[in-house]
Image (cartoon, rainbow, N blue to C red):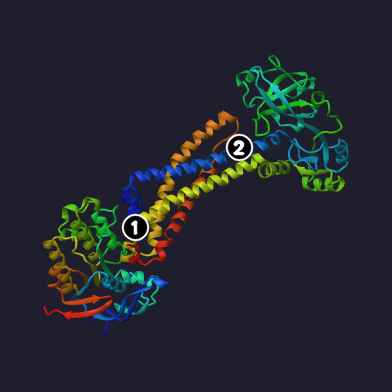
């Protein structure tokens, strides 16, 4: 290792030899950096899981445009949209069809007595073109009143039982005073606002939520005719519809805006965003503490080198060498432990806490950068002092 | 007075420590010309400014007032980059050996060569051989792969001397180099330094109390309270 580094650097690998000389400290430093990495990985994992789950319900629909109330930030909040908006929208050239979407929440008391919260998405089951194929294939089952498809990824649910569900072997449960029959399942996965999802017909929805009326859905989905520019159609719709009452966006824009709202203005999102910032700061402090102590401990030795005619770039080289070695040594166990923690979090919460390709690269580069900057700050004292004052 | 005959020339050199009320002058109007190839000894009681003077003319301290001409270069107002280059022409032997604890004896000496890059004494591949050879001359042939922590005080000091000598410096500054050595090895080291002076024209400036060395000195300068009080050329 020493010989390889010597060849690579074109000089004695003094940083490496220094680290190796005090193995206890090396172990402590590696553990410290691994811990900083784990901290950041876990916070990032949870935050990205939140970001992902916010988008999930939007991915169930196959629509171009969504009309929502002006005060709606997510799928569930805000006022209702009068159904007449869908007829108005149909008058705009390029709008092929419109579909009211109803959204609500029900409690599902499972066989074991535990209560699960399901977000209900309800639409006209004859409009299968508005949903992704997985739901479209089963949507005919919803033509019967009091039937529902439920999310087999629902947090806490008995997955073995849900896997057996079919039209011949349905599940039944009571909620809001009605008995629902579940002839099939879909796969979505819960998020921070609900444990899972349930898809029903609009007629079943209106029976479950007696205070809601057919004339006031939560959102209206639109499909455009081929050959029309979606953005141009949206412009037309915005001119036609009152912008103090409704907002017209593409489905992707609405999803993105929901994500931004929930991550920057809702407590959950803010807490996890703050967690990432705290993780990075604590990581930086740990790394700075390690590197600056190391420089302080070798100051006499560096002063001797300075007296011999070594310049500041030489010391920076040693520090970068140490920073790089520590970053690599700390990163490997940090990544392995984080991946295990992701698995544990995933199975414990049902949230999609998963490692992607970009995150380890970003964390690794961040570790090297913070190690290097910390080292550079720590060597400043060396640059300004006379060698004779450092002995 | 040319740089060749007198590698070190100081004029009106003053130095202070501290700031404000606590400011205290340590060196008073020192005018000194040191001859090339000779062994010059600085003596004086502790606190007389010997080490301060040595570090001023050895580029280890910024010159505050007056002039230091070192190998034809003015140190007063010199840039950090110039000082770095000037230090490479010097060899320093410290009172405390100041070896790097994480490096072996051989590696410590090699650091003294690497500072010159590949330009001096051939290729980098030869650094190790040159360093080992010099350690052998100083009687450390069997100890070259030892860490300083496993060497005796005298052995460490000899490694430090090898480190100072390995780059063939024009001037060697030594601050009580024989303090940690027994009589025999102390004499051996000073003889080696003198021999270098004769062969290569290396100038040596040494702070010492050691009487055995005074006998070998070419010139003895005595300081008291920051002033030169005595300056005796010794006829060899």
Callout 1: residue from which chain?
Answer: A
Q: Nearer the viewer, residue A302 or A317?
A: A302
Q: Residues within 10 Å of mark 2 (few under 14, many from 20)?
A: some
Farthest front residue in view: B21
The total of numbered circles placed on residues is: 2
Tell me, for residue A10, which label it has, or none: 1
First along the sequence among labels 2 and 1 = 1
Q: Nearer the viewer, residue B220 or A231?
A: B220
Q: Nearer the viewer, residue A18 or B56?
A: B56
Dot 1 lies on which element? Answer: loop
Q: Residues within 10 Å of mark 1 (few under 14, many from 20)?
A: few
> Where residue A183 appears, x then y in whole percent?
71, 19
- Alpha carbon distance from label 2 to label 1: 45 Å
> Where residue B33 appears, x then y in whole percent?
25, 81
Look at the numbered discs 2 and 1 and tell me whether their residues touch, using CB distance below 8 Å: no
Callout 2: residue from which chain?
Answer: A
**Image point 32% across, 64% down: which residue?**
B117
Q: Is residue A131 above or below residue B36?
A: above
Point out the image quarter for the N terminus of chain B.
bottom left
Give the image quarter of residue A179. Answer: top right
> Where residue A173 appears, x then y in whole percent?
72, 18
Is residue A138 visible from the viewing direction of this image?
yes
Farthest bottom residue in view: B1
**Image point 46% across, 58% down: which residue?**
A377
**Image point 28% across, 67% down: which residue?**
B120
Is residue B123 visible from the viewing direction of this image?
no
Farthest top residue in view: A168
Tell me, for residue A73, which label it has, or none: none
Mark 2 — residue? A49
């Amino acid at each position: 290792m020493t010989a390889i580094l010597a060849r690579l650097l074109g000089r004695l690998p003094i940083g490496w030899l220094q680290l190796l000389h005090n193995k206890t400290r090396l172990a402590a430093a590696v553990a410290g950096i691994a811990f900083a990495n784990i901290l950041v990985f876990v916070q990032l994992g949870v935050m990205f899981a939140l970001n992902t789950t916010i988008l999930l319900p939007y991915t169930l629909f196959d629509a171009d445009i969504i009309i929502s109330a002006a005060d709606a930030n997510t799928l569930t909040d805000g006022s209702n949209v009068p159904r007449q908006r869908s007829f108005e929208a149909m008058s705009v050239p390029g709008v092929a069809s419109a579909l009211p979407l109803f959204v609500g929440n029900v409690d599902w008391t499972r066989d074991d007595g535990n209560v699960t919260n399901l977000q209900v998405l309800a639409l006209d089951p004859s409009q299968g073109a508005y949903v992704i194929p997985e739901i479209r294939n089963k949507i005919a089952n919803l033509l019967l009143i009091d039937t529902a498809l439920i999310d087999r990824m629902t947090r806490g649910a008995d997955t073995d039982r849900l896997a057996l569900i079919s039209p011949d072997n349905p599940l039944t449960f009571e909620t809001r005073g009605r008995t629902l029959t579940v002839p099939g399942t879909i796969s979505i996965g819960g998020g921070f606002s609900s444990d899972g999802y349930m898809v029903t017909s609009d007629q079943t929805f209106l029976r479950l939520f007696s205070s809601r009326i057919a004339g006031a859905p939560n959102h209206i989905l639109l499909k455009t005719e081929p050959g029309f520019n979606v953005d141009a159609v949206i412009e037309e719709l915005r001119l036609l519809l009152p912008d103090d009452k409704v907002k017209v966006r593409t489905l992707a824009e609405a999803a993105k805006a929901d994500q931004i709202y929930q991550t920057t203005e809702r407590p959950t999102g803010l807490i996890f965003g703050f967690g990432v910032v705290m993780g990075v700061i604590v990581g930086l402090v740990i790394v700075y503490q390690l590197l600056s102590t190391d420089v302080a401990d070798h100051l006499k030795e560096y002063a001797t080198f300075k007296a011999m005619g070594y310049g500041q770039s030489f010391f920076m080289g040693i520090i970068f060498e140490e920073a790089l070695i520590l970053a690599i040594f700390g990163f490997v166990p940090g990544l392995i432990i984080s991946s295990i923690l992701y698995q544990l979090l995933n199975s414990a919460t049902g949230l999609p806490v998963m490692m992607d390709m970009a995150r380890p690269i970003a964390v690794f580069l961040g570790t090297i950068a913070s190690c290097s900057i910390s080292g550079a700050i720590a060597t400043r004292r060396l640059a300004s002092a006379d060698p004779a004052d450092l002995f | 007075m040319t740089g060749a005959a007198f590698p070190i020339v100081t004029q009106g050199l003053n130095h202070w420590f501290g700031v404000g009320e606590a400011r205290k002058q340590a060196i008073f109007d020192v005018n000194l010309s040191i001859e090339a190839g000779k062994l010059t000894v600085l003596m004086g009681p502790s606190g007389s400014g010997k080490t301060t003077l040595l570090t001023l003319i050895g580029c280890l301290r910024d010159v505050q007032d007056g002039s230091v001409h070192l190998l034809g270069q003015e140190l007063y107002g010199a840039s950090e980059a110039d000082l770095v280059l000037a230090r490479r022409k010097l060899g320093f032997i410290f009172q405390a050996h100041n070896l790097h604890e994480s490096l072996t004896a051989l590696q410590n000496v090699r650091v003294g060569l690497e500072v010159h890059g590949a330009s001096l004494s051939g290729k980098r591949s030869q650094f190790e051989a040159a360093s080992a050879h010099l350690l052998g001359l100083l009687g450390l042939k069997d100890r070259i792969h030892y860490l300083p922590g496993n060497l005796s005080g005298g052995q460490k000091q000899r490694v430090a001397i090898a480190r100072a000598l390995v780059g063939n410096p024009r001037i060697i500054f030594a601050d009580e180099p024989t303090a940690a050595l027994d009589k025999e090895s102390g004499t051996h080291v000073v003889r080696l330094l003198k021999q270098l002076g004769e062969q290569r024209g290396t100038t040596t400036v040494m702070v010492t109390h050691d009487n055995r060395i005074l006998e070998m000195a070419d010139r003895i300068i005595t300081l008291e309270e920051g002033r030169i009080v005595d300056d005796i050329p010794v006829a060899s």
